[in-house]
Image (cartoon, rainbow, N blue to C red):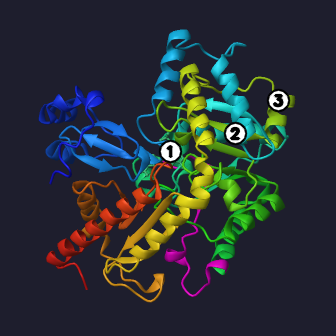
């Protein structure tokens, strides 16, 4: 069903909307292997061709207008159509489109951005290493962790602990650090020396406990793992403040402070992967601030440029920076595009917008609480077992039968794919939501207003109704 077909703003998309969707889809399936996609299935169905964005809205090549509930892929924090970013990028391309930052060379946007990031970061972060993606950022963090312990005279400390259902990227290091079973299964992953503990998922593991108790218990799984592996071998713990791709898993408030205490106790480095949580998503510049942790390294990407141009990096805390700088000599690591001038120019303008429009504050005080209340109301829907939210991200669980607590809901059989059915209804009706199994999640642009949150949640409710009708028709309900 075409939603609001033809509702395309004129001028800028004039050319794009004349594209022949079917021809593009055929070319797409003939030549383009998509990430995390069943290519066979996609070529039968045909990819949706996105042609234009403005604010929180996207238009596809058939003219359908959609609310982008996922900010592209957790990244378009300032929304689409920001011509000041386009102009900053164009200016930089004219002046100096590229030069490397190896061999004692730098460039103006990279210097300015490094200074800006040090100013925005939590206290104790004066240095940044640039990459082009979140995966490269986590590869870099791992290389830094290993190098740090070498420099500290403890090379036997090379084990890194992460969590099941974490997402840290798709390179070999990123996929190994991540705890996605489906990724590990398709290769000899994780690489040696990376171990996983259970995630702090109250709905999954917290039966019989208060959230407070569960947070402490889940953190203690880290201590148990450290003792099992030998504290003298453990180099670092890595985690997302709130797990994003894993399904917006919001840990209890007691979790991160206890993780911090355990890391301090054993002297191990704490890596806060802020590829999603950085740059305002949780209502603070960095998610670690909201969660009460003091990390040593902060990998970031996505929101630093709002996805307009690829850029990532690692904010390096004092402890690691001092070792690298004062004792390290050459750090044999880096990418052609580390400190790419065009990407850095885009980031500078993007950060200016976030600051000028006070978007972080807006999420903390206004839109975050509004989204929370709206999602809490969705929990009365017959299909929704429970719904949670923090800052500008939220999730709800589709269930076969509701229960008095999150632990008493009856899920759908996993193989049915209720989440995918629901996601299709969302797509067909003008709102993009991501399905992680049967958990439906959103992470809208930080510019989304309260009225637009209401518009989005209204559509979500309509789609939940359609999903309910659909699954009842299929005989899936209890
Ligand atoms: N860390 C985290 C926490 C991420 O969310 C990465 C690292 C890797 O970033 P790059 O830029 O290399 O992709 C991510 C990326 C999803 C989804 O389905 C999420 C991501 C990527 C692809 C899909 O929610 N996050």
Q: Does the residue labelled 1 lie within 8 Å of ligand 1?
A: no
- Is 127 above or below relative to 447? above
Residue at (40% x, 72% y) in the render: 397
Residue at (66% x, 70% y) in the render: 253
Q: Which of disc 1 and disc 2 is earlier in sequence?
A: 1
Q: How crowded is mark 2: few (under 14 residues within 10 Å), some or many (20 or more)?
A: many
- Is 383 above or below relative to 62? below
Residue 200 included in the magenta stretch of the image:
yes
- Is 382 above or below relative to 96? below
What span is in magenta? Answer: 189-212
Residue 208 included in the magenta stretch of the image:
yes
Q: Can residue 238 be seen in this view?
A: no
Which residue is the site of mark 1?
A: 77
Left or right of 111 in this view: 455: left
On residue 315, which mark appears? 2
Q: Position of residue 207 (x, y in %)?
A: 54, 84
Observer-nearest residue: 388 or 318?
A: 388
Which residue is the site of mark 3?
A: 325
Residue at (47% x, 37% y) in the render: 307
Q: Nearer the viewer, mark 3 or mark 2?
A: 2
- The local secondary structure at tag 2 comes to strand
Q: In which quarter of the image is the C terminus?
A: bottom left
């Amino acid at each position: 069903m075409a939603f609001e077909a033809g509702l395309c703003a004129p001028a800028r998309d004039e050319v794009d909307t004349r594209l022949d969707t079917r021809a593009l889809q055929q070319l797409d399936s003939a030549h383009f292997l998509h990430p995390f996609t069943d290519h066979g299935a996609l070529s039968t169905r045909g990819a949706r061709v996105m042609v234009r964005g403005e604010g929180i809205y996207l238009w596809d090549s058939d003219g359908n207008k959609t609310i982008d509930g996922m900010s592209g892929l957790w990244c378009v924090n300032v929304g689409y159509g920001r011509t000041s970013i386009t102009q900053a990028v164009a200016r930089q391309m004219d002046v100096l489109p590229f030069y490397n930052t190896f061999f004692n060379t730098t460039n103006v946007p990279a210097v300015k951005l490094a200074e800006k990031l040090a100013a925005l970061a939590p206290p104790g972060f004066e240095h940044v290493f640039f990459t082009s993606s979140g995966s490269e950022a986590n590869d870099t963090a791992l290389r830094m962790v290993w190098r740090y312990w070498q420099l500290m005279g403890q090379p036997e400390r090379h084990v890194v602990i992460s969590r099941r259902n974490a997402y840290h990227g798709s390179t070999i290091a990123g996929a190994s650090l991540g705890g996605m079973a489906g990724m590990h299964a398709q290769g000899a992953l994780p690489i040696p020396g990376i171990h996983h503990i259970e995630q702090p998922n109250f709905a999954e593991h917290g039966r019989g406990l208060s959230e407070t108790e569960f947070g402490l218990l889940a953190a203690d799984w880290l201590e148990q793992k450290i003792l099992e592996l030998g504290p003298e071998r453990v180099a670092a713990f890595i985690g997302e403040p709130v797990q994003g791709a894993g399904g917006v898993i919001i840990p209890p408030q007691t979790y991160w402070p206890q993780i911090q205490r355990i890391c301090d106790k054993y002297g191990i480095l704490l890596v806060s992967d802020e590829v999603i949580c950085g740059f305002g998503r949780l209502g603070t510049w960095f998610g670690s601030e909201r969660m009460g942790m003091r990390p040593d390294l902060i990998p970031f990407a996505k929101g630093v440029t709002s996805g307009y141009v690829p850029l990532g990096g690692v904010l390096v805390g004092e402890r690691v920076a001092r070792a690298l700088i004062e004792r390290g000599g050459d750090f044999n690591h880096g990418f052609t595009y580390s400190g790419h001038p065009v990407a850095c120019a885009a980031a500078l303008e993007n950060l200016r917008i976030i600051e000028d429009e006070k978007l972080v504050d807006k999420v903390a005080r206004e839109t975050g609480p509004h989204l929370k209340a709206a999602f809490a109301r969705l929990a009365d829907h017959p299909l929704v077992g429970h719904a949670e939210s923090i800052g500008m991200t939220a999730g709800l669980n589709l269930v076969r039968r509701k229960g008095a607590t999150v632990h008493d809901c009856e899920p759908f059989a996993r193989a049915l794919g209720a989440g995918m059915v629901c996601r299709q209804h969302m797509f067909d009706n003008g709102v993009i939501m991501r399905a992680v199994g049967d958990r439906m999640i959103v992470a809208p642009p930080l510019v989304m207003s309260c009225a637009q949150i209401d518009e989005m949640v209204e559509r979500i409710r309509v789609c939940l109704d359609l999903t309910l009708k659909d699954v009842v028709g299929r005989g899936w309900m209890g």
